[in-house]
Amino acid sequence: MISVLLADILRGAEVESRHYGVFVVADTAGRVVLSGGNAERAIFPRSAVKALQALPLLLSGAADRFGLSDAELALACASHAGSPLHVETASAMLARAGRDETCLECGAHWPVSLSAARALAAAGRSPGALHNNCSGKHAGFVCTAIHAGLDPRCYVGADHPVMRDVTAAMSAVTGEDLARRTPAIDGCSIPTYAIPVRRLAVGFARFGTSTGMPDGFAEAAARLRQAVAANPLMLAGKDRFDTVVTEALGARAFVKLGAEGVYCGALPEQGLGFALKCDDGNARAAEAATAVLLRRFLGPNEVLDRLANPILTNWNGLAVGEIRGQLPSNRPASGK
Amino acid sequence: MISVLLADILRGAEVESRHYGVFVVADTAGRVVLSGGNAERAIFPRSAVKALQALPLLLSGAADRFGLSDAELALACASHAGSPLHVETASAMLARAGRDETCLECGAHWPVSLSAARALAAAGRSPGALHNNCSGKHAGFVCTAIHAGLDPRCYVGADHPVMRDVTAAMSAVTGEDLARRTPAIDGCSIPTYAIPVRRLAVGFARFGTSTGMPDGFAEAAARLRQAVAANPLMLAGKDRFDTVVTEALGARAFVKLGAEGVYCGALPEQGLGFALKCDDGNARAAEAATAVLLRRFLGPNEVLDRLANPILTNWNGLAVGEIRGQLPSNRPASGK
């Protein structure tokens, strides 16, 4: 793996741990504006492409048919914290299509938010599929299936018509033909495909600017971006990176994490998209480096400063170290 | 950093993430038997040296004076899960010295065991210092202070007589003079010193064989090893790596994790010690590589096979990938 330093973790004045990775910032025409590491390396984007996977929900007409709200559309793009707000919103999406959580095939896990998990335990309850961080995305898949008159069962399978549309949308936006590829399986059981980092960056440049995509995609992408910008709490949860960035920047940036240290996003005003993967799958490094990336293109910002360089405290609240996000770039790609 | 591959994380048939690091296996005389990466790199061993930090508890006579049990001595070496068993044992240690948890200066955190944390929340309670994974070690520090007639307050400070003895014990065993070094601060607020990986490996060879150490250390080390081997559940907790390995191997191996991807340990029958650090601080890679290391020296073992190569499942229980522990070594050190 040809990689660059994404973050140093300092304890006192010494580097305790270190994270490497790869990133690409590209425009809608496919030009690499900035990159570090091997831009052609294929990575599993995981949940970082949820917004692309939500496009068929709008393209199919399902979102209009069922009158999905902006908050619900934002949740379809989310890796949420499993707080009551998220659970209720996912449930409401299913209800609009006349269904309930028994249709969800994402599996159950305790809320990502530890306080939400403890509150659930304190109430003597166990988590269900609605608490799964992907339940909004899956509720969107169920809505899409019902709108098309399809049996939603097995919608997570690569051969289900809904999932074929999802894969086709990702292919159309990224330019990577996924139809004949054998996928791996994601945490929530849907297919996940390894895609070159550069392709992901270009795809998000298109998604972020509503350009260079097939008919209908421009409107769908714009609506999803607007829905997320207006509902930052839906995208992740209180004090979580994606929510904090979206609260600070609104429609100026779209950011979405994926499992195993991935970030994808867009800078609509600059006409750019980006993708980033921490080699070791670590989120703290991916977040800090993404904050550095956003700051480089959007200029100084107090929130981004803090996210690029968080102070680490111990159980007594003592400052014991810090995370230093980095973004050392390769030389500009030739032909630029 | 000069490092070697410690683990590949596969999703389907493809490498999704990858972990590098450094490791050394050495004998009591300081000879490197096997290593990967730069053996002289200084790392923060964090909680991996808790057994060395527990030596003054025995050397001072405090353990005998207060009649500490083997289970309590094991807890002094532990990063425990915060289960009721651990909390009660730490509390009993303090009671033997006529003290209680108000003496602990480690800070409070929710139990490492998620089920223990949920049970606490379900009972409407919040965690205290006894739930801190380091509470057994800290209870040992308090016992040592009381036995010496010292005020235990500020025992976490590098200048407190108890902590000076702890630092001196680590210096004596590892051969690294720490007395005049400026420490960083650990998660539980005690000092932590960066020590070369090779020195740590040699130190644990000595600790594991009770040889090459100052007067009295041999008996203290033997007693701690025996206490841990007889109480694997105290060392970490149910289904956790250190406990599972100790349940399987007993006194044939001593293993202890440290935060940020560290393992230290000993193979007493082989006369060897080891230390390992995952560069990015990840525990899954440190565990898998440590299992490979143990298997290489102890021979085939079903438990180690599973720990070296865990299958990854998703929220529906589907197998989606695996962890492949690795241990590519440098050529044997010259002079061996």
Image: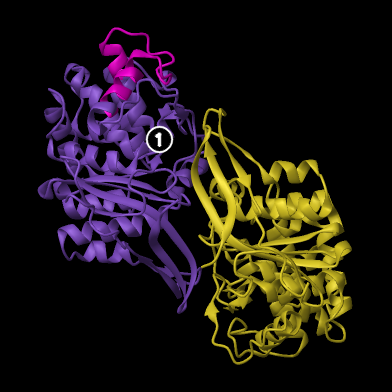
Chain colours: A yellow, B purple
Q: Position of residue B238 (x, y in %)?
A: 32, 50
Vertical relation: A233 (above or below) A213? above
Quadrant into which the C terminus of chain A falls: bottom right
Q: How many marks?
A: 1
Residue range in magenta is B143-170
Q: From the viewer's side, name the closer residue of B188 and B75.
A: B188
Vertical relation: A158 (above or below) A10? below
Seen at 70% across and 68% down, the residue is A136
Q: Position of residue A103 (x, y in %)?
A: 63, 77
Q: Quadrant of residue B37?
A: bottom left
Q: Position of residue A295 (x, y in %)?
A: 77, 50
Q: Position of residue B256 (x, y in %)?
A: 30, 44
Can you see residue A15?
yes
Q: Quadrant of residue A257?
A: bottom right
Q: From the viewer's side, name the closer residue of B140 and B199.
A: B199
Vertical relation: B189 (above or below) B37? above
Residue B235 shown left or right of residue A139 in the figure? left
Q: Secondary structure at mark 1?
A: loop
Going by the numbered disc 1, the residue's amino acid type is Ala
Task: State yes or no: residue B162 in magenta.
Answer: yes
Residue at mark 1: chain: B
Seen at 13% across and 46% down, the residue is B271
Name the residue that disc number 1 marks.
B194
Seen at 26% across and 66% down, the residue is B305
